[in-house]
Amino acid sequence: MMQLSSALRDVIAASVPQLHAHCRDAWAVIGSAAAALLGADVQAADLDLLTSVADAQRLIELWPSRLDTAYIPAGADRFRSRFARFHFPGMPLEVMGGLELHGSDGWQAVRVNHVMHVNVAGIDVPIPVRDEQIRILESFGRAKDLARADMLRALQQHGAPDRSS
C-alpha cells in the first residue's frame, strides 16, 4: 500500500477541518488526490474539491488571503464551475463549485453519488467510492484521467481493500 505524500497530508491537515466547519452542502475530494487516498500510485499536484456553488463562494470569502487570483485553469471549453485556487501548505487546493462537464449532451453536472470516508491523521476525508472515481475520471476523457481510472480499476481487480491511513 502506497504512503501518502507529506504535501498531501499537509494540505489535508490545513484545510479539511475548515471544510467540515464551513461547508453546508456535501463535498468531496476528487481527481488525483482522491485516487491517491484510495491507494493508487499517483502523485497529486493539488487537492481538488467538488463543492456546491454556494460553498465555493463561502470558501472564497473565508480564505481571501489564500486566493490565487493569477491562476487560470485549463479546459474552459470542457469544464465550468465556480472555480477558486488557494495557497495551502503542501500544495494548492482547487475548489470547483457546481462543476459541469461539456460533452455530447451539452453541459452536464458532475455528481458524486456515493462517497466513503478515509482517515488521514485523524481527519475524515470524503472521497468518491472506487466505481464513482472511475466513472468521473472516464467522463473527463483526458489521458491523465483515463490513466488514473485504469490504475483504480487495477486496484479493484487485485482485490485491494479500500484505503484508510
Image (tube, rainbow, N blue to C red):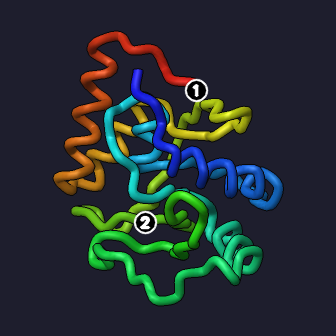
* Disc number for residue 22: none
Which amino acid lies under the numbered mark 1 shown in the image of this protein? Ser
Residue 123 in picture, x, y percent from top left: 71, 38
Furthest toward the left, the residue is 143
Q: Nearer the viewer, residue 24 or 49?
A: 49
Q: Nearer the viewer, residue 160 or 99?
A: 160
* Disc number for residue 165: 1
Q: Nearer the viewer, residue 105 or 79?
A: 79
Q: Nearer the viewer, residue 102 or 75?
A: 75
* Disc number for residue 100: 2
Quadrant where the N terminus lies?
A: top left
Determine crowd level at label 2: few under 14, some 14-19, many 20+ residues with C-alpha closer than 10 A.
some
Which amino acid lies under the numbered mark 2 shown in the image of this protein? Glu
Determine crowd level at label 1: few under 14, some 14-19, many 20+ residues with C-alpha closer than 10 A.
some
Of labels 1 and 2, earlier in sequence is 2
Marks 1 and 2 sit apart, C-alpha to C-alpha, by 31 Å
Residue 47 in picture, x, y percent from top left: 50, 56
Residue drawn where x is 27% and y is 15% of the image: 157
Secondary structure of the residue carrying numbered label 1: loop
Residue drawn where x is 54% and y is 63% of the image: 93
Secondary structure of the residue carrying numbered label 2: strand
Q: State whether residue 144 is above or below residue 87.
A: above
Residue drawn where x is 73% and y is 33% of the image: 122
